[in-house]
Amino acid sequence: MPSACDSLVDDIEDMVNSNDPTPHERQFARRSIVPRARKCKQQPAGEELLADSVIPGTQTIWVRTWGCSHNSSDGEYMAGQLAASGYKITENPSDADLWLLNSCTVKNPAEDHFRNSIKKAQEQNKKVVLAGCVPQAQPRMDYLKDLSIIGVQQIDRVVEVVDEAVKGHSVRLLGQKKEKGKRLGGARLDLPKIRKNPLIEIISINTGCLNACTYCKTKHARGDLASYPIEELVERARQSFQEGVCEIWLTSEDTGAYGRDIGTDLPSLLWELVKEIPEGAMLRLGMTNPPYILEHLEEMAKILNHPRVYAFLHVPVQSASDSVLMDMKREYCCADFRQVMDFLKEKVPGITIATDIICGFPGETDEDFEQTMELVRQYCFPSLFINQFYPRPGTPAAKMEQIPAHMKKQRTKDLSALFHSYNPYDHKIGERQHVLVTEESFDSQYYVAHNKFYEQVLVPKKPEFKGKMIEVNIYEAGKHYMKGQPVEDAQVFTPSIAQPLQKGQVSGLPQELKTVRASVATSALVGWSWRFDGDGLKLLSFGLALAAIIMIFVIELH
């Protein structure tokens, strides 16, 4: 049977259906609608009842996200908006009617997982909506044909796209958000959200970057730098703490470049944010490239020494060879990276600096690679992300002469062996540390905490420790963690200024609204379907006969 829409629709406004509410009506629903039951004719006995349309908002959605913390934040926002609009969010893909797949384009394996998930969804007859950097960067890929796409700057319209997808339509929103001709950071920060961890808020401070790295595909999706105003970011942090969050992560494609497009800078933002952090709560900075942190080293050292800021920084070097860095167009030399390392290690004692290295970039010689190995030997990075080079389609590096695959694999293996040859935490056994407990370990045997230097400390899994700042004695150390024994009779401090939300609970909904849902089963009545949308009731569709009528009433408490 042919689809209701044989060709792709460029934008949601192009859908020709007079019965559908416009986006403006959806956003600003009237507050005084009273549902009325319409009389219906008695259905002849024995005649089958058929619904004339699909009712959006009654389905179950599975959200799957790959990639960075920026992508994770986008996924949380999309899940929150869908839940606030009536959809049920599930962690079990087999229970879902629609899969929302939020992709990462950094490496080939991530895109392979994304492509395979699309195929699996189609094999299981699931509806699919695509998001993230892969479809944004290359929306005309063959395997994306006829599928709905929500762009990285359009996540505030995810409900509209999902509504159309469940009805069998294919819709694509890939535009950029602009104001007075200037590109914005993206969707509003005060949208509903379901935090994966109710104790941790991820805030994207900007999107895009100022670089043009020859290997990077993310630039094709996220574009040039666009920063959020400081006041909006501070307000988002303030709201998060009021919802029981005790740890904030700042994220973007390059946090160090923050503000250059709007006349401010990263230290100015951080000094405003630390004013809002409750005692015992912590702030973690995201990735910054060397060029943009160099000019702020003095201020950054002061901020990283602040008691409510983790002494942690992620500064990717990618290679210690200036020749390779030039081919990558990284806009710094290895001496610049060493300057960042040496200055911060001196001014912020104990600081953790994580870095990234690409093995087997086109043109990398044995001598180039040895320089990278020597850098790792010198600094013994406690956190090192090792990546075998993958040529991404459409990037300049993909057109360069490639190094043989076996050589790339060997260099990756050699660097990994060097990284695993030292233990960065052995000297900390016997120390007493204050740690903030925020997560559960992958094996569910411990709670995961972090000390001032964002080093992972495993503690006993006692419910009273979750979301608390506790004092521990370090008694064991591994490659990526330490284990801590809580100090007897030590004070357990609660940094949250409010009760944290429950897992799966929607953040950011207006407190003055109270939603009451009632399901009424019927088999012979003609029904109206209503659903919460924004701040009132919205009439969605009229059914000739429905197996169940779902009515959602919103009572505004003034």
Image: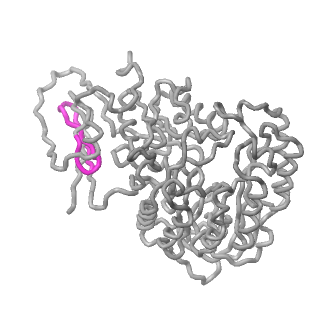
x and y, in percent, of residue 177 in the image: 42, 44
Identify the residue at horizontal 69%, vertical 39% (top origin): 215
In what quadrant of the picture does the C terminus appear?
Answer: bottom left
Query: Any magenta on residue 125?
Result: no
Compared with 228, 307 (above or below) is below
Query: Any magenta on residue 524?
Result: yes
Residue situated in front as seen by the camera: 245 or 551 = 245
Q: Which residues are magenta?
A: 517-538
Identify the residue at horizontal 45%, vertical 67% (top origin): 241
Find the residue positioned furthest to the bottom: 489
Q: How many marks?
A: 0
Colouring chosen for the image of the structure: one colour
> Image quarter for residue 150?
top left
Q: Is residue 463 visible?
A: no
Residue 390 is left or right of residue 267, and the answer is right
x and y, in percent, of residue 44 in the image: 15, 21
Residue situated in front as seen by the camera: 512 or 525 = 512
Residue situated in front as seen by the camera: 435 or 543 = 435
x and y, in percent, of residue 134 in the image: 56, 36
Compared with 140, 476 (above or below) is below
Residue situated in front as seen by the camera: 321 or 148 = 321
x and y, in percent, of residue 294 in the image: 67, 61
> Image quarter for residue 549?
top left
Find the residue positioned furthest to the top: 1
